[in-house]
Image (cartoon, coloured by chain):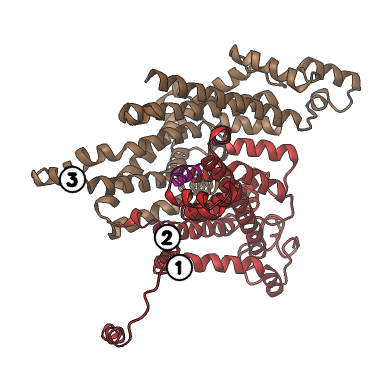
Chain colours: A red, B brown
């Protein structure tokens, strides 16, 4: 029925042919991917939870760092399970786990987004420079990429954080400075073949300089793999931050963050299941949503990958 | 081929040297009070100076580095600050544990990943395909410490409570003490590691298998009336495994310095946990030794992968 009406429309009044860029087509494909859209909705919910974390405090009346040693702990000093006052139970210091999870989302998302942004900017710029400029620049940068990719990242990250002392800035910088190499390698590989193409020659013949060609002409052509990689990098960064926290190198207490909460729940997992379960679930749901969304983005931007 | 090998190994040595400079510089520039720690709280400045002198910490950084490099080339990575044990000996003690962990997990994740990948590729877009993709992404999303703790909770704590004393809470039992206890101590860490890594292999096998199954020679094989299972396993899987093996080499190399969390959760005194202990004590020779050793493992694994590639595909050698 609808098809018939559309046919008539077309016959009556031919529409102008609309040019659609590969990007628009990819977004179109992504919007039809149910799993990706549900994951995106979950991500948005987590973002909202992070932004409106104070609302959780307002509703429950529990600030994130307030220790309710009387009503929040059992007479033996153990965490209390989920109840009417503390919906998701309390931790080892009698703090409200629900409120701390909401505030913890801020840390995870903030580190996830900022560290990923730093990673991608460094990776894209160095990858572009290496691939496009070639020569000695490429040789030096390619070796640098090899070096960073060969270093055991987590060990060096732990060592660095333990030397400088844990803080949000250090975590973001350490992750950003050690993760860019994979991005740079992907971009470099793409640019190596792109720089031989006619449109680069055309730009040069019009008098464009290296900088203009790199960022205006070549860069848009490497954006698809960069976008895919970026969405898949966010969950990795979130897990890395949580891992550092778990190893005791996260944010200084009493700041609420998921990795730190799971770390302090370790000694209680036999007596207080909620203490590890809820922060663990928050972390798992977040990374799973980002990974499923990233998977959808990959399929949408690389149509070859999933069509048979 | 000889030229290719020489060039590739040369690159590897250069990368390792650069890492040694970077790591050495990074850690020695950072403020360290190890002499103070060793001397104790009541130590006089003279004692501290003496300790610094004994450890070579009073020399300029570049002199310390040359000293370190000279010894390293002779196979001596220095001695730990606290017990004067050779770093090479510390690594040699921890390495079998990390290798046991990595290799056992590797067998599991390869089996799991390749099997799931083949099922997915032979039934694309089916319920099984979607289910397996979701399954692998689910575990891929797991932070390794969380998965480890959950396994400990259910398979150690819950089972033991229920009277099944199958798995220990952690620790390591050398293979010399019997295969049984060795496996028993490593099963949970193996599962934890394998579930995390299997996802990459499922995806890789699926993608490359789908490409291969679309090739003409597969159609030929089918048209000759060869059984489908034989077509898939013998004709398809064989060539589809190349990218899987490449990834395998790289992952195995990275695991030598990358199983920090799994070793910590399951109290396995392998390289990762040894490094974490050294980091907490600011025991620089041990940290630098392990970081360098782990980097070398990555470099060597990459070279082996490249050689494998060059053997399989002569075009690679020209570049």
Residue labelled with disc 2: A296
Instruction: Name the dominant secondary structure of the magenta segment.
Output: helix
Residue A150 - label:
none
Residue A87 in view, yes or no: yes
Residue labelled with disc 1: A37
Q: Earlier in the sequence, mark 2 or mark 1?
A: 1
Depth-wise, is mark 3 or mark 1 nearer the camera? 3
Q: Nearer the viewer, residue A155 or A102?
A: A155
User: What secondary structure is found at the residue carrying circle 3?
Assistant: helix
* Point 80% across, 27% down: residue: B37
Q: Residues within 10 Å of mark 1 (few under 14, many from 20)?
A: some
| Magenta residue check for A175 | no
Q: Is residue A256 left or right of residue B101?
A: right
Residue B216 - label:
3
x, y percent for residue B158: 48, 49
Specify the subunit that label 1 lies on: A
x, y percent for residue B178: 42, 24
Residue B84 in view, yes or no: no
């Amino acid at each position: 029925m609808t098809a018939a009406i559309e046919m008539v429309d077309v016959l009556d009044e031919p529409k102008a042919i609309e040019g659609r860029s590969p990007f628009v087509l990819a977004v179109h494909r992504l919007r039809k991917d149910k799993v990706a859209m549900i994951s995106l909705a979950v991500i948005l919910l987590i973002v909202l939870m992070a932004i409106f974390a104070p609302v959780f405090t307002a509703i429950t009346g529990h600030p994130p760092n307030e220790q309710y040693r009387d009503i929040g702990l059992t007479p033996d000093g153990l965490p209390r399970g989920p109840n009417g006052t503390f919906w998701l139970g309390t931790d080892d210091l009698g703090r409200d786990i629900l409120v701390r999870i909401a505030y913890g989302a801020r840390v995870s998302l903030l580190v996830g987004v900022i560290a990923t942004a730093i990673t991608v900017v460094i990776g894209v710029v160095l990858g572009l420079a290496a691939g496009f400029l070639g020569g000695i620049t490429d040789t030096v940068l390619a070796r640098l990429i090899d070096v960073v990719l060969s270093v055991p990242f987590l060990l060096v990250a732990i060592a660095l954080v333990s030397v400088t002392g844990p803080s949000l800035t250090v975590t973001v910088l350490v992750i950003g400075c050690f993760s860019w190499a994979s991005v740079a390698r992907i971009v470099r590989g793409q640019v190596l073949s792109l720089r031989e193409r006619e449109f680069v020659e055309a730009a040069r013949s019009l008098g464009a300089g290296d900088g203009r060609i790199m960022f205006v002409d070549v860069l848009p052509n490497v954006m698809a793999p960069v976008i895919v990689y970026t969405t898949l990098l966010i969950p990795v960064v979130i897990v890395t931050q949580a891992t550092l926290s778990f190893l005791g190198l996260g944010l200084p207490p009493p700041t609420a963050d998921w990795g730190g909460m799971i770390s302090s729940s370790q000694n209680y997992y036999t007596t207080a299941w909620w203490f590890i379960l809820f922060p663990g679930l928050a972390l798992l749901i977040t990374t799973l949503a980002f990974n499923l969304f990233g998977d959808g983005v990959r399929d949408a931007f690389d149509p070859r990958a999933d069509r048979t | 081929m000889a030229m290719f090998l020489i060039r590739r190994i040369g690159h590897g040595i250069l990368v390792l040297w650069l890492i040694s400079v970077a790591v050495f510089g990074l850690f020695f520039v950072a403020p360290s009070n190890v002499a103070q720690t060793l001397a104790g709280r009541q130590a006089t400045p003279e004692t501290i100076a003496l300790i610094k002198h004994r450890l070579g910490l009073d020399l300029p950084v570049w002199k310390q580095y040359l000293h370190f490099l000279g010894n390293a080339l002779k196979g001596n990575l220095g001695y730990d600050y606290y017990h004067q044990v050779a770093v090479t000996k510390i690594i040699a003690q921890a390495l079998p544990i990390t290798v046991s962990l990595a290799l056992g997990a590797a067998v599991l994740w390869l089996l799991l990943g390749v099997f799931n990948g083949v099922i997915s590729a032979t039934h694309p877009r089916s319920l099984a395909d979607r289910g397996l993709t979701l399954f692998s992404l689910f575990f891929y999303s797991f932070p390794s410490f969380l998965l480890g703790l959950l396994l400990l909770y259910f398979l150690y704590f819950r089972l033991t409570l229920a009277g099944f004393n199958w798995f220990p809470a952690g620790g390591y039992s050398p293979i010399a003490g019997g295969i049984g206890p060795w496996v028993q101590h490593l099963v949970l860490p193996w599962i934890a590691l394998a579930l995390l890594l299997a996802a990459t292999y499922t995806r890789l096998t699926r993608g490359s298998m789908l490409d291969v199954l679309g090739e003409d020679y597969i159609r030929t094989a089918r048209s000759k009336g060869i059984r489908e299972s034989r077509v898939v396993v013998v004709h398809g899987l064989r060539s589809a495994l190349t990218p899987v093996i490449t990834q395998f080499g790289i992952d195995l190399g990275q695991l030598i310095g990358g199983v920090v969390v799994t070793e910590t959760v399951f109290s396995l005194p392998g390289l990762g946990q040894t490094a974490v202990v050294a980091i907490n004590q600011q025991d620089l020779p041990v940290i630098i030794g392990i970081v360098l050793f782990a980097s070398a493992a990555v470099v060597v694994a990459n070279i082996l992968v490249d050689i494998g590639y060059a053997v399989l595909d002569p075009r690679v050698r020209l570049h």
